[in-house]
Image: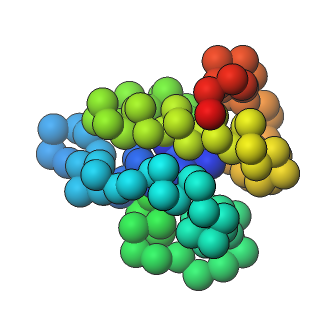
Amino acid sequence: MKTFFILCALVVAVSARPDGFYTDKYDNVNLDEILSNKRLLGPYIKCALDQGKCAPDAKELKSHIKEALENYCAKCTKAQQDGTRRVIGHLINNEPESWKLLTAKYDKDGRYVAKYETELRTIA
């Protein structure tokens, strides 16, 4: 949600392109750098949770989290799909409290969590 969805986020970048996909403007973001540094990751999580200010890319990303979760990132580019899986996998495996908060906000009924958790529990 990819971000968590921030992260689904991060990756799911922003506004829809005319061809029905999200913009690829942020497809080259260095996810390894962000995911390995809590100082960089934290603001994205806080933005997604409405607990902090949002940078422009995070704000646009946040606007697509729910839709990306619901349609399994159907409007994502290949890079965004891969990045979303990495981000969600990282959150599940390394940031369980943030994952829990994000899923409570974006998947209150738990319809999508099981799908992602089962598949991504071991992806780092």
Q: In the displayed structure, does residue 25 sit left or right of residue 104?
A: left
How many marks do you count on the picture? 0
In the rendered image, the residue lying farthest to the left is 18
Q: In the displayed structure, does residue 43 sit left or right of residue 111?
A: left
Kindly tell me whether residue 113 is visible in this rendering.
Answer: yes
Identify the image quadrant of residue 19: top left
Look at 66% across and 79% down and name the residue there: 52
88 to 72, vertically: above or below:
below
Assign the C terminus to one quadrant of the image. top right
Look at 29% across and 49% down and name the residue there: 27
Kindly tell me whether residue 68 is visible in this rendering.
Answer: no
Q: Nearer the viewer, residue 71 or 33?
A: 33
Look at 41% across and 32% down and name the residue there: 82
Q: In the displayed structure, does residue 122 sit left or right of residue 59?
A: right
* Percent coordinates x, y for residue 112 in the rendering: 67, 28
Q: Nearer the viewer, residue 32 or 53?
A: 32
Q: In the displayed structure, does residue 3 sit left or right of residue 101?
A: left
Look at 52% across and 32% down and name the residue there: 85
In the rendered image, the residue lying farthest to the bottom is 53
* Percent coordinates x, y for residue 59 in the rendering: 47, 68
* Percent coordinates x, y for residue 102 in the rendering: 73, 51
Q: Nearer the viewer, residue 38 or 57?
A: 38
* Percent coordinates x, y for residue 83 in the rendering: 44, 39
Which colour scheme appears in the figure? rainbow
Assign the N terminus to one quadrant of the image. top right
